[in-house]
């Protein structure tokens, strides 16, 4: 049974990643997304990409990765909907106090080497469709002249596949490929035409009402390209963050090659892969929660103002190379308690329909419903309630982490196979939002018992939690 909070906690900053959701499905769920306490919704790339016939169901449509292979920026026309669907979604989210963020693919265009040998985008078949159904395509046009191509061979880097992933020049000029026999994704230059088209696209989405952008494959884009596109007028009043996958924080080679220069030479945010790796290692059998006391101090987390924090992103379960970083279900839930309980960064909660094929212990798609589960609503409620309150670690050992958020909340996380007890100075009774359990103080002494592989998020004010 669900019940609303007795204490008003306005949404603050939590992002729902509605990965590969149709725009109509996002729109339909807007009231629920608002009720759960989210503030923003990140949707998959809103461009033209390969899709199945209109009206086809998801199973007979195209795969998620097709959304990351653009054919044109000037119209939104893909498996998730078109410009009209997208605009309706943005407006509906806005009506519910929710901001729309869009995943943006600017590093490359679609690999269409199987059907043609040139680099004109859109291809001849798509250009013919624009002319044949001119009224429709004009109705979904974002900008530009659809009678002319967006790009041609003069807009691309000379083709070669990336082989050395620790060579900055090669990673930022070569093609992302699926192997030696794959021609790969054509890499765009940062010439005047490319930059002009990309900026026009961003301005068109801003005019619709988009409030944030995720820069896909930012690791593969030169700093020159990023700075030319993401200028002050584009970034004004927008939340923008890049995807730069690294295997850790400061001192790790990938961090120093790709993420450190990005952070130094831009003012954009980024996915906090250093923190994710710190969390992942902390939850391993030999890992310790001591590493979570202040990871930023040791270069193992990004600064609070620039970090997008997470326990899972779409790349981790949907790419074979990252599958070993899919956390155990229980550990992932505890990691969400840390992400949503701590002070710092903007938390992102991942959801997918069934793209990865990974199932949970009940046999259902792993990330199908977690975004709306009672425990997640209560965690988000805690986050919104303590937002802006100072964080202080009370206890941290190998298996137990206890920290407080001002005088409003307490987080207790136990990853061990045994129950643990935490003691701290406090005033007044506290209630665990996740279980409903109440703990009373004896004088100023508060003792909290947390069972094995469990977490608690306790508040002093009367907030009615949601139970399943």
Image: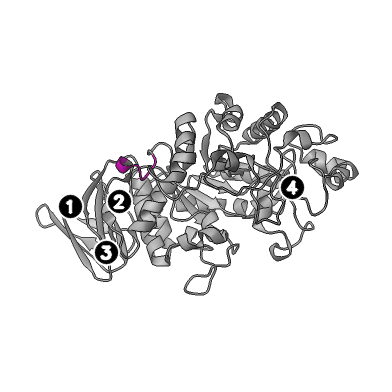
Q: Is residue 346 visible?
A: yes
Magenta region, residue range: 297-302
The residue tagged 4 is 77
**Quarter of the rendering containing residue 389:** top left
Circle 3 SS class: loop
* Residue at which label 1 appears: 428
What count of labels does the image hold?
A: 4
Mark 2 surroundings within 10 Å by alpha-carbon count, few (fewer than 14), some (14 through 19), many (20 or more): many
Magenta stretch, main secondary structure class: loop
The CA distance from mark 3 to mark 2 is 26 Å
| Mark sitting earlier along the chain (1/3) | 1
Which quadrant of the view contains residue 284? bottom left
Residue 468: name its quadrant.
Answer: bottom left
* SS state under label 4: strand
Lateral position of residue 232 relative to residue 112, left or right: left
Above or below residue 205? Residue 283 is below
CA separation, marks 1 and 4? 56 Å
Q: Between 451 and 252, which is closer to the camera in this rendering?
A: 252
Nearest to N terminus: mark 3 or mark 2 = 2
Which residue is tagged 2? 292
Q: Locate residue 337 relative to residue 438 in the image: left or right.
A: right
User: Would you say 67 lies left or right of 297 here?
Assistant: right
Q: Earlier in the sequence, mark 4 or mark 3?
A: 4
Image coordinates for residue 135, horizontal then vertical, percent = 85, 41
Residue 422 located within the stretch drawn in magenta: no
């Amino acid at each position: 049974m669900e019940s609303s909070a007795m204490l008003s906690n306005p949404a603050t900053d939590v992002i729902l990643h509605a990965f590969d959701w149709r725009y109509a499905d996002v729109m339909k769920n807007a009231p629920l997304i608002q009720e759960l306490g989210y503030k923003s919704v990140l949707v998959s790339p809103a461009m033209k990409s390969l899709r199945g016939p209109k009206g086809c169901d998801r199973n007979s449509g195209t795969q998620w990765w097709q959304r990351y292979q653009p054919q044109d920026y000037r119209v939104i026309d893909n498996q998730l909907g078109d410009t009209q669907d997208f605009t309706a979604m943005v407006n509906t989210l806005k009506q519910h106090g929710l901001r729309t963020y869009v995943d943006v693919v600017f590093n490359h265009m679609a690999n269409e080497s199987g059907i043609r040998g040139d680099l004109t985008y859109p291809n001849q078949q798509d250009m013919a469709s624009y002319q044949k159904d001119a009224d429709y395509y004009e109705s979904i046009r974002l900008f530009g002249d659809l009678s002319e191509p967006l790009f041609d061979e003069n807009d691309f880097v000379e083709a070669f596949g990336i082989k050395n992933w620790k060579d900055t020049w090669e990673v930022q000029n070569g093609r992302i490929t699926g192997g030696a026999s794959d021609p790969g994704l054509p890499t765009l230059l940062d010439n005047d035409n490319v930059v002009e088209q990309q900026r026009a696209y961003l301005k068109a989405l801003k005019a619709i009402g988009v409030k944030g952008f995720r820069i896909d494959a930012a690791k593969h884009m030169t700093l020159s390209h990023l700075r030319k596109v993401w200028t002050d007028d584009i970034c004004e009043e927008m939340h923008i963050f890049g995807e730069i996958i690294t295997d850790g924080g400061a001192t790790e080679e990938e961090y120093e090659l790709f993420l450190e220069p990005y952070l130094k030479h831009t003012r954009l945010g980024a996915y906090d892969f250093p923190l994710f790796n710190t969390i992942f290692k902390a939850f391993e059998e030999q890992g310790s929660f001591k590493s979570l006391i202040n990871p930023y101090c040791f270069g193992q987390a990004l600064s609070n103002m620039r970090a997008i924090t997470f326990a899972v992103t779409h790349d981790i379960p949907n790419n074979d190379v990252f599958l070993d970083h899919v956390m155990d279900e229980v550990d992932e839930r505890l990691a969400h308690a840390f992400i949503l309980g701590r002070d710092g960064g903007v938390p992102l909660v991942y959801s997918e329909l069934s793209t990865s094929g990974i199932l949970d212990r009940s046999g259902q798609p792993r990330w199908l419903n977690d975004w709306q589960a009672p425990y997640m609503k209560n965690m988000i409620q805690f986050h919104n309630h303590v937002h802006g309150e100072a964080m202080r670690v009370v206890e941290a050992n190998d298996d137990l982490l206890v920290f407080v958020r001002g005088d409003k909340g307490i987080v207790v996380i136990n990853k061990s196979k045994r129950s643990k007890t935490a003691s701290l100075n406090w005033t007044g009774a506290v209630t665990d939002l996740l279980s409903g359990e109440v703990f009373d103080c004896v004088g100023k002494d508060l003792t909290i018992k947390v069972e094995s592989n469990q977490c608690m998020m306790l508040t002093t004010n009367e907030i009615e939690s949601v139970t399943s």
